[in-house]
Image: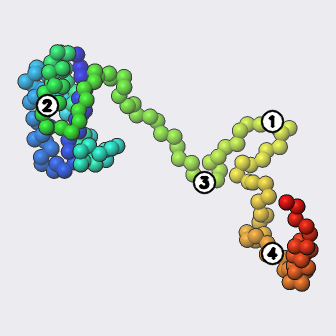
Amino acid sequence: MRYELITIYPGFLTDSELPTRAAEVKTLLETEGAAQIQEKMMGKHKLAFKIGAERFGHFIRVLFDAEKAAVKKLEERLRLSNLTLRHMFVEYNPAREKKAMPRKPALVGVGAVTPPRVSAAVPVVSPLVSVGAPKVGEPLAPPAPEKVDLADLNKKLDELLEKEIAI
């Protein structure tokens, strides 16, 4: 049966140390009878949470053929060794492979938004124009506040303060 093994190695490993660690895991697989071993370096990534003191890890994906009993032995041996931070064995399913999604064309300019089709009886309003938008040539700044006479303000304030406040 075909299996997939994802291993996470400590982030402090250098580019020269990583292949030797991966080769140790590969020899471990070969000793347990794994065949058709394919490795893929997936790069160094930030971990979702700290593992020990590590915030980063090198990810390697290994595809191989092995018996179920051999995979159980491999998992136990990897758990007891200090070669990896984490590892996970799963049955390989080629249908789960990411397929290249066709890219949508990039929207360029204002004319990229196409309005929905409507009949001729319904007036078409552009979704890009908001109601109350300033006309061409109008200033964009808000209107200046009205000037308030200080005497009128004091009179209004006195009226408000003289009213009885209901408690």
Secondary structure found at label 3: loop
| Residue under label 3 | 109
Q: Nearer the viewer, mark 2 or mark 4?
A: 2
Mark earlier in primary sequence (3, 1): 3
Marks 3 and 1 close (CB-CB < 8 Å): no
Q: Which mark is residue 145?
A: 4
Between 38 and 161, which is closer to the camera in this rendering? 161
Mark earlier in primary sequence (2, 4): 2
Left or right of residue 144, residue 8 in this image: left
Q: Residue at x 79, y 58 (%)?
A: 132
User: Which residue occupies the extreme front position in the image?
Assistant: 167
- Three-letter amino acid code at disc 1? Ser
- Is residue 26 placed above or below 34 in the rendered structure? below
| Residue under label 1 | 119
Q: Nearer the viewer, mark 2 or mark 1?
A: 2
- Is residue 135 placed above or below 122 in the rendered structure? below
- Three-letter amino acid code at disc 3? Gly
Cα gap from disc 2 to disc 4, whole angstroms: 76 Å
